[in-house]
Amino acid sequence: GQSLEQPSEVTAVEGAIVQINCTYQTSGFYGLSWYQQHDGGAPTFLSYNALDGLEETGRFSSFLSRSDSYGYLLLQELQMKDSASYFCAVSYGGSQGNLIFGKGTKLSVKP
Amino acid sequence: GAGVSQTPSNKVTEKGKYVELRCDPISGHTALYWYRQSLGQGPEFLIYFQGTGAADDSGLPNDRFFAVRPEGSVSTLKIQRTERGDSAVYLCASSMNTGELFFGEGSRLTVL
């Protein structure tokens, strides 16, 4: 089967940097994605890593280590609007395979 | 439309009734996923389609749940003999198999 682990809650202050870790166990691993979801809203795509290393998109970066079955999402220069839930998700079974989500990390950004 | 459209946005039904939830994906997206999400939880996988066929339906909780995508575009999730435990937000997403899923706003199902 597939399983993902990520912290349930993280709190940080405006302007700070926060890292949300994700470990996974899956057969046929293909890639790791990150999604953001505000309360009452739909999940929105943030990033995708299929290869080892760091992907940077503005204030957000995502890292993957396939050998360690581990990835993280790094959020820099935190803003109040970044308060949301963040989900890691694994793709498996190839480019046309399935996508399974973790339980999510609720990030609270304080002034 | 430009995004994934789900109808109805809200559905209240009585225990034992039949419910259909519709998803209209982004035009040209070959993959379509159904998830359900309870408060404070991550999206729970139900079923996904590649074109018209169900590529993986292992997430459907039991035989009361069924989904179709007859022409490879619109999909309908069907729930028979609804139970209170079926209450959740049902999310649909579509993709061009790039690793990026585009989600609709969801259908909130409440079973009384």
Image: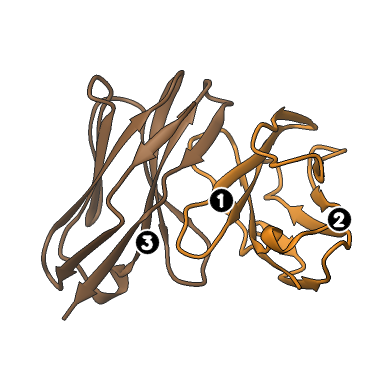
Chain colours: A brown, B orange
Mark 1 and mark 2: Cα distance apart in space:
30 Å
Q: Which residue occupies the foreground of this view, B85 or B96?
A: B85
Left or right placement of residue A77 versus residue A34 in this view: left
In the rendering, at what x and y percent does residue B109 appear? 71, 66
**Numbered mark located on residue B81 in the image:** 2
Q: Quadrant of the N terminus of chain B?
A: bottom right
* In the depicted structure, whether residue A41 falls above or below residue B4: below
* In the depicted structure, whether residue A107 falls above or below residue A94: below
Residue tagged 1: B102
Please give the name of the residue rendered at 28% of the width and 64% of the height, measured from the top-left corner.
Answer: A107
In the rendering, at what x and y percent does residue B49 appear? 71, 34
- SS at mark 3 in the image: strand
Both on one chain, marks 2 and 3? Answer: no
Mark 2 and mark 3: Cα distance apart in space:
32 Å
Task: Please count the marks in the image.
Answer: 3
What's the amino acid at mark 1? Answer: Phe
Which mark sits nearer the N-terminus, 1 or 2? 2
Residue at the limit of the structure toward the left, as seen here: A16
Left or right placement of residue B48 versus residue B81 in this view: left
Q: Which residue occupies the foreground of this view, B16 or A105?
A: B16
Residue tagged 3: A85
What's the amino acid at mark 3? Answer: Ser
- SS at mark 2 in the image: loop
Quarter where residue B60 is shown: top right
* In the depicted structure, whether residue B26 falls above or below residue B109: above
In the rendering, at what x and y percent does residue A67 appear? 24, 19
Chain letter for the residue marked with disc 1 in the picture: B
